[in-house]
Amino acid sequence: MAGLKYLTGFGNEFASEDPRCPGSLPEGQNSPQVCPYGLYAEQLSGSAFTCPRATNKRSWLYRILPSVRHKPFTPINCGNLSENWNEVEPDPNQLRWMPFTVTKASEKKVDFVSGLHTICGAGDSKSRSGIAVHIYTCNTSMINRCFQNSDGDFLIVPQKGEILITTEFGKMMVEPNEICVIQQGMRFSVDVFGETRGYILEVYGAHFELPDLGPIGANGLANPRDFQIPVAWFEERTVASGYTIINKYQGKLFSCQQDPSIFTVLTAKSTRPGVAIADFVIFPPRWGVADRTFRPPYYHRNCMSEFMGLIKGHYEAKEEGFQPGGASLHSIMTPHGPDFDCFEKNSTAELKPERVAEGTMAFMFESSFSMAVTKWGLETCQRLDKSYYKCWEPLKSHFNPNWRPSSK
């Protein structure tokens, strides 16, 4: 598609910015106290914080508004998307499918998400181990909504019709005989140009990587240069009726409207280096001395589950509402970060050495498992704070497209 630009490579460290906003990437740091153009810094993690360098995956995004500013997620109809592998009895016979039917737009408009159909799979997204195979059949572009898979990576294989995928990282056109990987937690929408069909392989708990070469030699199989990454692109617009985020979480669909572990005390290791079944992490009193930096925890979507508790005091990122004896759970790829008061105060605070969390002790159980909440936790205990999301509602756009770096 004319106008689309890409960077080339697989597993590389990429940095790009929309040419409409030159200098939008901070220099020499990830989370400055005030970002260029009045943007919010937000990290999307693809691995545990403590993974070895070769397997450590994370991306920094600089956004007009952080993704945490959304209404609560509510369940929606999953259609033909499923993770129930026990619906029918096992069948060891040979199976073959005729071409899957694509509904005509004149009969019913079907977009990428409503056109997802699960064929088979194994494993469990909660335990972060398994796969699923889906097909998509659609005839209509996604309008004012996007999709996020909190369960795993999508490898998309178009078979009929090209698809224009708009992601948080940029735009890419994918045609039959090409493939596309959308990694866990990345939000995207799909535009189509007629009746469209394709296949999807979903993996839980792992990321796709290039195969080892071994005896076939240095130049066999796919090469890193065969893969393209979209260049950064942004849009600033409001939708009167609301922009919808559809989240696939633990095999179910939910929707909402959008208007590092350096303190680990104990760890229960998994079989993957740097990935824990569970870490016990504390946030004790300490000195804050980082210069030119937004010091509280940054906005974040994590590939781990984070269960926090407060023993005493006031947690720095949410001084109100998070009380001793209470708790919070930020599930896999659910956005979180400082509340409005914390962000505004720390964006303008004088950055001098200061004592942080004096008289406070907070802790976290961090796990690579996608944890399910019990009925007691959601209903019976009657202690769930249903207004929690409101602490982010006052967050406002500070984006100034006329900002320019100061001359040096």
Image: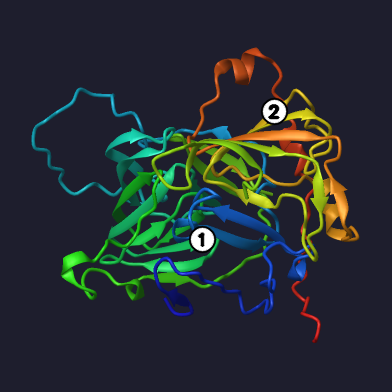
- The residue sitting at 21% across, 65% down in the picture is 214
Q: Which residue is mark 2?
A: 327
Q: Is residue 370 visible?
A: yes
Which image quadrant: the N terminus? Answer: bottom left
Residue 199's place in the image compared with 30, above or below, is: above
Q: Earlier in the sequence, mark 2 or mark 1?
A: 1
Looking at the image, which is closer to me, 151 or 365?
A: 365
Q: Which residue is mark 1?
A: 167
Coordinates of residue 312 in the picture (x, y in percent): 81, 29
Coordinates of residue 184 in the picture (x, y in percent): 46, 50
Looking at the image, which is closer to me, 153 or 98?
A: 153
Q: Residues within 10 Å of mark 1 (few under 14, many from 20)?
A: many
Coordinates of residue 308 in the picture (x, y in percent): 67, 33
- The residue sitting at 25% across, 66% down in the picture is 177
Q: Is residue 139 left or right of residue 52?
A: left
Looking at the rendered structure, the secondary structure element under dot 1 is strand
- Amino acid on which the number 2 mark rests in the picture: Ala
Q: Residues within 10 Å of mark 2 (few under 14, many from 20)?
A: some
Q: Is residue 280 left or right of residue 14?
A: right
Looking at the rendered structure, the secondary structure element under dot 2 is strand
